[in-house]
């Protein structure tokens, strides 16, 4: 069953935008979130979010940690570069 997903318009540390599922208690307020659509997996939602925000990551609470790990690997070079600046 597909779930609604949102991405936070406000960037967190390292310019990350966190993706949340519908009903997550950490979901941003209405004016701070962008509706992504309905997806069957958090991975699909995060991939959609990355079309808007390349640094999009899954929320620890509502998206599986394995997804976040994969994205961290893909972004590790970019993030290290940003930190070194
Ligand atoms: Zn969440």
Image (tube, helix red, strand yellow):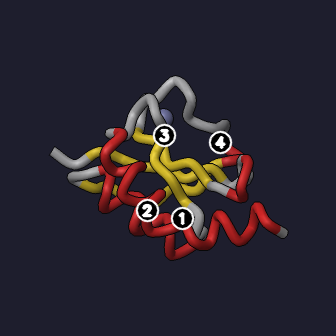
Can you tell me whether the CB of the residue at mark 1 lies under 8 Å from the nearest atom of ligand 1? no
| Extreme residue toward the top, this view | 25
Q: Is residue 66 above or below residue 36?
A: above
Sequence-first tag of 1 and 3: 3
Q: Residue at x 52, y 67 (%)?
A: 75
Tell whether 47 sits left or right of 44. right
Circle 2: element type = helix
Viewer-nearest of labels 4 and 1? 1
Quarter of the figure that contains the N terminus = top left
Choose the circle earlier in sequence order: 2 or 4: 4
Between marks 2 and 1, how big is the CA–CA gap?
A: 5 Å
Determine whether the residue tagged by mark 4 lies in a helix, strand or loop. Answer: helix
Circle 1 packing at 10 Å, graded few (<14), some (14-19), many (20+), is few
On the picture, is 64 further left or further right than 18?
left
Which residue in the rendered view is the most extreme toward the bottom? 51
The picture places residue 20, in percent across and down from the top left corner, at: 47, 42
Mark 3 and mark 4: Cα distance apart in space: 17 Å
The answer for how far apart the CA atoms under marks 4 and 1 are is: 30 Å
Would the CB of label 3 be found within 8 Å of ligand 1? yes
Q: Residue at x 64, y 55 (%)?
A: 16
Give the quadrant of the C terminus.
bottom right
Q: Please state the horizontal and vertical placement of residue 31, each as a whole percent of the image.
A: 71, 47
- Of the residues tagged 2 and 4, which is closer to the observer? 2
Mark 2–mark 1 contact, CB under 8 Å? yes
The residue where tag 1 is placed is 76
Q: Residue at x 50, y 53 (%)?
A: 57
For residue 48, side relative to residue 53 (left or right): left
Residue position for label 4: 30
Answer whether labels 1 and 3 touch (C-beta < 8 Å): no
Q: Relative to 17, does residue 23 appear above or below in the rendering? A: above
Numbered badge on residue 57:
none
């Amino acid at each position: 069953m597909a779930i609604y997903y949102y991405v936070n318009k406000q960037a967190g540390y390292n310019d990350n935008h966190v993706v949340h599922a519908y009903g997550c208690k950490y979901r941003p307020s209405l004016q701070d979130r962008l509706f992504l659509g309905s997806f069957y997996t958090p991975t699909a939602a995060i991939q959609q979010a990355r079309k808007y925000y390349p640094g999009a990551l899954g929320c620890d609470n509502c998206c599986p940690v394995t997804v976040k790990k994969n994205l961290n690997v893909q972004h590790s070079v970019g993030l290290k570069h940003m930190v070194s600046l």
